[in-house]
Image: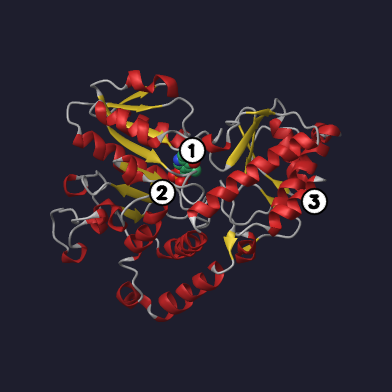
Amino acid sequence: MTIEARAREFDLADPLAAARALFRLPDGVIYLDGNSLGALPRATPQVLARVVEEEWGEGLIGSWNRAGWFDMAARVGAKIAPLIGAAPQEVIACDSTSINLFKLIAAALQLRPGRKVILSEPGNFPTDLYMISGLEAQGLARRRLAAPERLAEALDGDVALLLLTHVHYKTGAVHDMAALTKAAHAAGALVLWDLSHSAGALPVDLNAAGADFAVGCGYKYLCGGPGAPAYAFVSARHLPRLSQPLTGWFGHEAPFAFVDDYAPAPGIARLLAGTPPILGLAALEVGVDLIASLGVARLYAKAQALSQFFLECLEALGVELELASPADAAARGSHLAFRHREAHAICQALIARGVIGDFRDPDVLRLGFAPAYLSFADMAAAARHLAEVLARGEWQRPEFRRRAAVT
Ligand SMILES: *Cc1c(COP(=O)(O)O)cnc(C)c1O
């Protein structure tokens, strides 16, 4: 049976097949970068138009109350909560992932007086490592990096916080959240999980793992749009004592009392700093509602099936590429990484054929399998494109050569 025939059978049996129609994807494009910028839900433009024209245009400032703008950050956070195994009052949608990292790293340091070390792994997403460095430059933290297999021994009595990305942004490898959280707690440290490549793609159970803090992106699998607000989770057991350094007026217990002295809001709202971006939250809410309606368990099952089938297609087509992701689907998230010296040119050649993946320095071709809107037919077609690019040496064409300024 051809890979196309097998894809047809998989698509006919796919319980999520109809979900593709809920997204807008350009004709002739196979979008394998939903792990970087999720596709546009069809409902988003109308919702944004309504918020702009009715709530802003007509309701003006009254919409803070009448259209529920005040509660929006908490409301969207509460909708993200079930996707990550949190209680609704433990999650808020706000700021960027980078800024939420800063707030929660600082909060962890404050909860562990006498300890300054923030432990992470080399090769973690840059912003996670840079945000630790920023606090280090302020004299507040010390950065320590240890490879995954050495994390246990690096967890000594100086470590205030273990900061890891649950699904690695390059390789897709998944950390054992429960085991690492337990190990950190045994050493007296807190744990902060970055869920940017997890939420909406695979099941996460922060509270079952006993996690302390988490952050994540709104514009990847949650389809909130470019620069969408991120989210932050604080375990209910820490909320009453949690203090974070960006003590802006929206995190105040009574923002409109306009008093001189700061007092934090009683709950998760204390993570807010300034005025929430209402348009961004409106778009994020559409994405979160849509992904939640599809069900994380079904999304995860399909993501694994898609990436597995893609690998089978490559094998059937005789493509030999070094897989930089775990070979076992259960040990990875929703994307695959392939290592090749010419990964950049291969990626460009694929894009020229309408197969949009991405390149990660220095040698990784990253293909994301967002389960909400991809089909098995997409897998077969993308695999065939990749096979042809390699077999014909198409990537050697001068227009695919890397330029000084990387796009
Ligand atoms: C995408 C991503 C981010 C992005 O952070 P921003 O502040 O939104 O730019 C952070 N961490 C990880 C692990 C990511 O994959």
Q: Which numbered disc flags the more N-terminal residue, 3 or 2?
A: 3
Residue 161 horizontal/vertical position (percent)? 29, 31
* Numbered tag placed on residue 402 in the rendering: none
* Disc 2 Cβ-to-ligand 1 distance below 8 Å: yes
Q: Residue at x 26, y 31 (%)?
A: 185
Residue 299 horizontal/vertical position (percent)? 54, 53
Where disc 3 sits, the SS reads helix
* Disc 3 Cβ-to-ligand 1 distance below 8 Å: no
Q: How is the image coloured?
A: secondary structure
* Numbered tag placed on residue 5 in the rendering: 3
Q: Residues within 10 Å of mark 1 (few under 14, many from 20)?
A: many
Q: Quadrant of residue 268?
A: bottom left
- Check whether the beta carbons of the residues at disc 3 and disc 2 lie within 8 A of each other: no
Q: Amino acid at mark 3?
A: Ala
Q: Quadrant of residue 332?
A: top right
Q: Which numbered disc flags the more N-terminal residue, 1 or 3?
A: 3
Name above or below for residue 170 compared with residue 199: above
Q: Quadrant of the C terminus?
A: top right
The residue singled out by tag 2 in the image is 96
The residue singled out by tag 1 in the image is 167
